[in-house]
Image: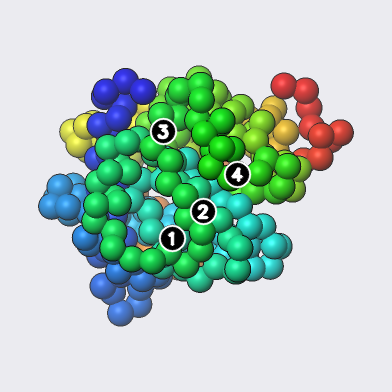
Amino acid sequence: MLDSTKRRISVTAFLTAAARAVESQRPDRLFDDPWAALLASREGFSILEKGEDRGASIVVRTRYFDEWLQRLTQEEGLRQIVLPAAGLDTRAFRLTWPPATRFFELDLPAVVLYKEARLQAQPRCQRTILAVDLTSSDWENQLQQAGFQPALPSVWLVEGLFFYLPLEQTRQLLARLSRLAAPGSWLGFDAIHSAMLSSPLTSSRIQLTKKNGAPWIGAIADPVALLASFGWQASFVSNARKGYEYGRAIFPFIAPEALNAETEKLYHMLVTAKRLPLEESPRL
């Protein structure tokens, strides 16, 4: 990736860890991440304090995908989990996993070095870390050489990445991971609609992302259609609705009764999709 893109992802990794650290201190916390404060750094907490909802969007996303991953592994029996752009995620350590669960964490070398230097704990699953550039042509081979089995169903979670990338880079990454995902695999990610980039209601957040050096640029108008083109059957829910369900209001603080197809375009979409059998998939 370009140096500027590498920097944006690293900054957001600190922010994500800070949000998880603050949430973990609440008596009504939605999850407990005892390593987040160690990983967040002063920079992460500084950025977090500037946000209108103090990281509620990250907190809700974390809880939503925690539940999703636990269901897929504990109830549906999937045992391979891949985190492209894993950042400072600690799910391999803080959640309970069925026996033989394998975690594959992929991120840039600088992120991996920082994280591994600070994490002094034993994971609760088989954990493999790969220092790779997701825009390179060889990370797929590296993943397989590390033990990933593309013939078996897998779970892919891409958090907090696509809205920092041009849409074409998002398409390329989706194409690559789709080649490795067997029928029955699952994919989860968060995305934004272009309305969020232009609405007066969200302008302060958009300006803040730019000031922090991590501007949102990658909008996805229709994630269901986009994923269908790669052979996935998808659905999504706005993080605003999940936020009210979890007791965490998310900026721009639209009341629950005012949420509809249009107003929800101002929030992140929490997308999940299942890989269809090849005979049901459209040709790429």
Q: Nearer the viewer, mark 1 or mark 4?
A: 4
Check contact, mark 2 vs mark 1: CB within 8 A: yes
Disc assigned to residue 91: 1
User: What is the C-alpha distance between the residues marked 2 and 1?
Assistant: 9 Å
Disc with the residue nearer the chain's start (1 vs 4): 1
Disc assigned to residue 148: 4
User: What is the C-alpha distance between the residues marked 4 and 3?
Assistant: 15 Å
Tell me the quadrant of the picture where the N terminus can be found.
top left
> Callout 2, which amino acid?
Phe
> Callout 3, which amino acid?
Val
Check contact, mark 1 vs mark 3: CB within 8 A: no
SS type, badge 4: loop
Disc with the residue nearer the chain's start (1 vs 3): 1
Judged left or right of residue 118, residue 163 is: right
Check contact, mark 4 vs mark 2: CB within 8 A: no
Disc assigned to residue 132: 3
Measuring from the top left, give residue 113's x and y in whole percent. 27, 44
